[in-house]
Image (spheres, rainbow, N blue to C red):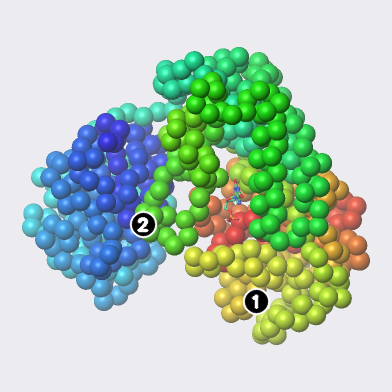
Amino acid sequence: MVHPGSIVILDFGGQYAHLIASRVRRMGAYSEIRVAETSAKELKGAAGIILSGGPQSVYEQGSPQADPKILELGIPILGLCYGHQWLAQTMGGKVSPGKTKEYGHTMIERTGEPAIFQGLPKQFTVWMSHGDEVSALPKGFVTTASSKVCQFAAMADESRNIYGVQFHIEVTHTEHGMDILKKFVGICAPAPWGITSYADQVGAEIKKEVGDRKVFMLVSGGVDSTVAFTLLNKVLGAERVQGLLVDTGLMRKGEIKQIESAFRPLKITNLHVEDASDEFFKNLEGIVDPEEKRKIIGKTFLDVQARVAARMGLSGSGPGSGWLLGQGTIYPDTIETGGTKHADHIKTHHNRVDAIQKMIEKGLVIEPLKELYKDEVRILGEELGLPHDLVWRHPFPGPGLGVRILCIQMSDEQMKSEKLKVKNDENISVPHVVLPIRSVGVQGDGRTYRHAIALFSHHPCTVTSEQKALATSIPNSNKDINRVLLCTSHDHPQEFHVSPASITRDRADLLREADAIVSDEVRSADLYSDIWQFPVVLLPFGAKKGNESIVLRPISSTDAMTANAFILDEGVLTKITKRILTLPGIDTIFLDLTNKPPGTIEWE
Ligand code: XMP
């Protein structure tokens, strides 16, 4: 069953289901996501339904279909894009391939004033992305907006509160998108939702779930587990909670101290910090392959946790042992959306691996944030008294700096012959060098592992539109390359020398310093909250033998699924470059200009 009074988003596989749900919540209404096929019976009690977009054609065999009985529930329904087409087809209208596909900004003209368009201008710009279109309206519907190429860009049957729009109201490119959503939410009269006083709202539930047991919580240093641990402390009291923070040696500068000192004023002292950095560095010695590094980091984590838990007398958190495992899982981690349901490669979140899943089924795991979105977790964190800077920190991957310290086995000489395998770079017209390192990227549904290319210019800290265009066109036309960088430390191509290297404490310390410089400059320039994430990466080669390089990877994104390179201005880029070049052993700096796809946010 759904939460009574919630607005349910039925997900047809588009990328925006979470975006719609979190926007509805920000309007003060409870929302949740369900797979497209959810039965009408299960949806009873919802205040309204939003049908999402999706990549398929509604008339195609095997395309996702909702239960037609939802149309008889008597609650307001809004279809977006695929959802609009599904409504038209299911209610007796027609959907066919459009004569002209419409992608991007499009002007529409209202032909009526249904409740969801009330007060809007006659014409406004919307974001379209469709090949199919509604070609005949179902009975009872009227056209409410048209574009030049799409006659039925919006339709409504106001007597039943059913609305369809061909465009995406949830993206910021659509003018008045939020006004339309707000009007729809108002029509639904949903259950109110707010994050304020959440601790009081869920306190009783947490107490009931835990009963007379205690909770063992793994605090990773990330925002979610830190907030979950704080919430459990507040609700259950310190004597019934024990936290463990493992120092892997791969965290950011001062991170552990920052967490400890955030807890101090809250009188939270039940966090044990285990310094296992020697063990992590030892296990990573000589390891180069990105996947192998990840696996070793994951396994070392589990070994350390098991050992410490045993030492604390918390092992065997089986039934009757008196202990539950606490996790900082948040809502998007738990929801199988249309996008993941129909995808070939389902990424299992680390909070949902088999062993944990079995414990969840036995009722041995408590996840107090599993109803919340990230921004809600952050607001709750502040409400619980955690410092603003800590709860609004950029996302940081579980394996930490481990995926930002690139490693290489080959000698300089071997690498030179490897470099020759990169073909087709002669058609790139600006000065460039193919770099002696490969990184992970993404293309279609698959991952790539290819070389990066660096561009050089006489104004090395100024990003031009030509360079931005090359960041897209080079990976498109060179199958050996998936990343395009701008060298900000040199104005003409260099010969680079690799030094075989794996992850060591010295390299982690060096990267930590570079990362701290970047954070410092970005905060001083007041850019921290404009940038989604800013990985800083260490590469095992330099212009001088034995030296290393640093890559700056600022990006903007809304959900990390896709991302654009964030363009830093010349002043900030120059300052960061100069300061990092003062670190001993670093002689080259690059700025990563690659969007995702074809790059990923992280390099490994
Ligand atoms: P990519 O590199 O795939 O990253 O574009 C997308 C987002 O996921 C984060 N990331 C991770 N987070 N464990 C995590 O907890 C991981 O192994 C991991 N790898 C990538 C990355 O920082 C970005 O926010």
Q: Residue at x 72, y 48 (%)?
A: 401
CB at disc 1 and ligand 1 closer than 8 Å: no
- Residue 232: x %, y % from top left: 54, 22
Left or right for 29, reference 400: left
- Residue 11: x %, y % from top left: 33, 51
Q: Residue at x 50, y 31 (%)?
A: 365
- Residue 426: x %, y % from top left: 70, 85
Q: Quadrant of residue 270?
A: top right
* Along the line of sight, the residue nearer the viewer: 338 or 529: 338
Secondary structure beneath dot 2 equals loop
Question: The N terminus is located in which quarter?
Answer: top left
**Please, is residue 390 above or below residue 261 in the view?**
below
- Toward the left, the furthest residue is 139
* Along the line of sight, the residue nearer the viewer: 383 or 321: 321
Left or right for 542, reference 305: right
Amino acid type at mark 2? Gly
User: Is the C-beta separation of discs 1 and 2 under 8 Å?
Assistant: no
**Please, is residue 472 above or below residue 392 in the view?**
below
What residue would you read off at disc 2?
A: 13
* Along the line of sight, the residue nearer the viewer: 569 or 267: 267
Q: Residue at x 35, y 40 (%)?
A: 32
Q: Earlier in the sequence, mark 1 or mark 2?
A: 2
Q: Quadrant of residue 188?
A: top left
What residue would you read off at disc 1?
A: 480
Question: The C terminus is located in which quarter?
Answer: bottom right
